[in-house]
Image (cartoon, grey):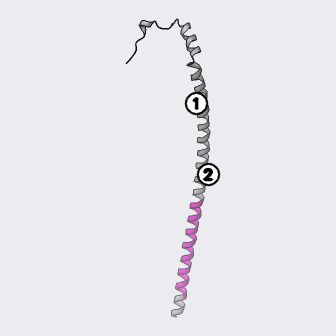
Amino acid sequence: MKQDERKNQAGKVGKWGLIVSGLAAFGLSLGLVWLNVQMVNISYDIKQLESELQSEKTLNAKLEVERMHLVSDYKLQEMASRLGLRPPEKEQIRRLR
């Protein structure tokens, strides 16, 4: 009788162990899927940020070309003559020491 009880008890422990192992495997699988989904989402975010960075670099280069054009000597002299400006007289210049 005691052997039957031990076998029955061992069978119950074995069933519970199997159930717990199955649930643990399911939980780990679910965690792995979630991590993969997060990795895909982050890679999409990285691609989008790289695209934005490239756009900003392109815009920066265009603005730098425009700035260089606007501060060129020829352009400044042209704008000054249109506004009626002329070089300062010698007595108008102050030197800092």
Q: Classify 10 Å Cα crowding around label 2: few (below 14), some (14-19), many (20 and above).
A: few
Q: Give the structural element (helix, strand or loop) at label 2.
A: helix
Quadrant (top left/top right/bottom left/bottom right) for the C terminus: top left
Tell me the tag on residue 60.
1
Determine which residue is flagged by label 2.
40
Q: What percent of the width, then of the height, locates residue 92?
A: 42, 8
Would you place residue 28 above or below residue 55 in this image?
A: below
Prevalent SS, magenta region: helix
| Residue at x 56% of width, y 23% of height | 67
The three-letter amino acid code for the residue at tag 2 is: Val
The residue positioned farthest toward the left in the image shown: 97
Counting other residues with Cα less than 10 Å from the Cα at mark 1, is it few (<14), some (14-19), or many (20 or more)? few
Is residue 15 left or right of 90 when viewed as pictured? right
Q: Is residue 28 magenta?
A: yes
Task: Provide the secondary structure element on which disc 1 rests.
Answer: helix
State the CA–CA distance, disc 2 to disc 1. Answer: 30 Å
On screen, residue 94 versus residue 72, left or right, reads left
Q: Residue at x 53, y 7 (%)?
A: 83
Q: Are marks 2 and 1 in contact (CB under 8 Å)?
A: no
Q: Please provide the residue range marked out in magenta.
A: 7-32
Taking the spot 57% from the left edge, 57% from the top edge, the residue there is 35
**Viewer-nearest residue: 96 or 81:** 96
Residue 8 within the magenta-colored segment of the rendering: yes
Query: Which residue lies at the image location 53% right of the left edge and 92% below the top edge?
Result: 3
Nearer the observer: mark 2 or 1; the answer is: 1
Q: Quadrant of residue 21?
A: bottom right
* Amino acid beneath label 1: Asn
